[in-house]
Amino acid sequence: MLPFLNCRHRTHVRVVDFFPPELELFAHCTSDPSWDRRARKAPGDSHSKRKWEWGFVLLLEDAKVHSDTVSEKLRVVVGNEAGQHLLDMNAQE
């Protein structure tokens, strides 16, 4: 028996909130030291070599909440690869 199960599930949720508060901030430059610690150590690069990545948080809840129940919320951190699949595009300035 394996120590974990690799399962696939489908759900219907809605986005209740997101962070950062502006959609323009969902993409981050990897040469920005406030976003990527490795950028502090690396020498400065030109604008032509800049690489952008997705990074944001979504607060989700069930799309069908019954009126007599309290909805449970789930915080989901979306990284670069998940952001590319979710938005069907690469991050850019």
Image (spheres, rainbow, N blue to C red):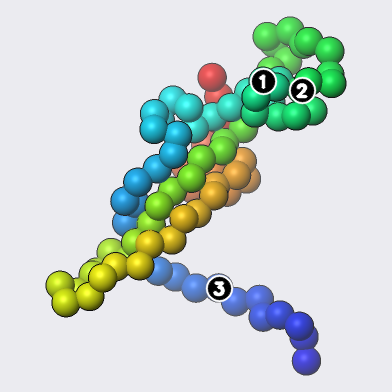
Marks 2 and 3, the one that precedes in the sequence: 3
Distance from Cα at disc 2 to Cα at disc 3: 36 Å
Residue kind at label 1, given as amino acid type: Asp
Quadrant (top left, top right, bottom left, bottom right) of the N terminus: bottom right
Label pair 1/2, CB-CB below 8 angstroms:
yes
Question: Is residue 52 visible in the rendered structure shown here?
Answer: no
Could you tell me which residue is drawn at 40 percent across and 43 percent down?
18
Amino acid beneath label 3: Arg
Q: Earlier in the sequence, mark 1 or mark 2?
A: 1
- Between 25 and 10, the one nearer to me in the picture: 25
The quadrant of the picture occupied by the C terminus is: top right
Nearer the N terminus, badge 1 or badge 3?
3
Q: CA distance from mark 1 to mark 2?
A: 6 Å
Residue 50 lies in quadrant: top right
Looking at the rendered structure, the kind of residue marked 2 is: Ala
Residue 1 can be seen in this image: yes
Mark 2 sits on what residue? 39
- Of circles 2 and 3, the one toward us is 2
Element under label 1?
loop
Q: Is residue 56 left or right of residue 31?
A: left
Q: Position of residue 53 (x, y in %)?
A: 62, 32
Q: Mark 1 or mark 3, which is nearer to you?
A: 1
Residue 32's tag is: 1
